[in-house]
Image (tube, rainbow, N blue to C red):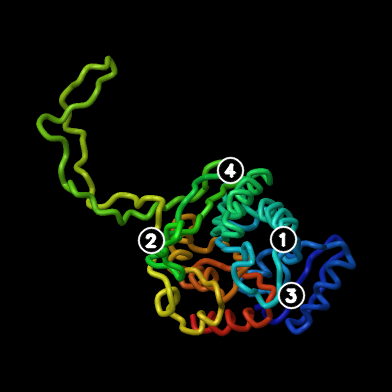
Amino acid sequence: MWGHFTTVFYEGGSIHFPDTHESVFRSWLKTNNYVSITTRLMQDTILHQDCKVALAELQAESIDLTVTSPPYDDVRSYNGFSFTHEDFKTIAAQLYRVTKPGGVVVWVVGDATVKGSETGTSFRQALGFMDAGFKLHDTMIYEKNTSSFPAKRTGTRYTQIFEYMFVFSKGGPPKTAHLICDKPNKWAGHTNWGKNTQRGTDGELVETSDIKPVPDFSPRNNIWQYVVGKGFNSSDKESHNHPAIFPEKLAEDHILTWTNESDVVLDPFSGSGTTCKMAKKNKRHYIGIEVSEEYCKLSESILSKY
């Protein structure tokens, strides 16, 4: 966590804080107007804080990837904690500040149905991230194999089995993109039928041997399918003590796609620690932020096994 001691260097010199004096350390920082704790000191920890506060303490442009799902539309009771639109705007602005140029934020979100209408919260938040400065790199879909509320034959609405995975990038295209190539190609090993030709500089077709055969696998589509439910979302049974976990494979797939080893992965709504666990398992650093003490203890218990 904090090591044996923390050393802070500043214009007047340096000061040491024992690892048991984290609160003293934070107080010293604020008293001396050092409101940004270096991200290195925060790495590989679960912070028991409101994420609006914790994000403000992170250094600017220090995070490679954020993978998170906010407690949207009060779909689940969250130990009495709320998440308002004003909270969202503050968090979006802070995520933009702490994300590195070319870094990515994956925002997993859906909509509740209230008084016969979907709320549209997901779209408002996507536009809110763009207002904060992010590029909307991709609108991906997290498709579930089943639903807790299947459609009835007498109903008016089809079974809802997906959530959005909005992929935002800062400043331009993602600086890292290892696209997962697991879509089998029907015509693997084949080239063109008949003669292999391509257009020359004059526009005419010319024969060529410079045509590679179709590979065995190509990049997957942007609709990702996962088996969900107890026993499937997580390899740790105790993770299901949290009411709204997403599949650990979803977190892992995004971590493998948008980061390299030793990069820093953030989850400002870390819950049971799914994103942090998969970052740790794949040799990335992690920072989890969680307002509920109960879920902080749960995630730390799970992380201690890896």
Nearer the camera: disc 3 or disc 1: 1
**In this rendering, would 235 be left or right of 130?**
left
Q: Quadrant of residue 27?
A: bottom right
Residue kind at label 3, given as amino acid type: Thr
Callout 1 amino acid = Thr
Crowdedness near tag 1: few (<14), some (14–19) or many (≥20) residues, C-alpha within 10 Å: few
Secondary structure state at the residue bearing disc 1 = loop
Vertical side of 34 occupied by 189: above or below: above
The earlier-in-sequence mark between 2 and 4 is 4
Q: Earlier in the sequence, mark 1 or mark 2?
A: 1
Vertical position of residue 233 compared to residue 237: above or below: above
Report the amino acid beneath label 4: Lys
What residue is disc 2 on? 225
Q: Nearer the viewer, mark 3 or mark 4?
A: 4
* Residue corresponding to mark 4: 135
Give the residue pinned by disc 3.
6
Label 4: element kind: strand
Residue at the disc numbered 1: 84
Gap between marks 1 and 2 measured at Cα? 30 Å
Near-viewer residue (108 or 10): 108
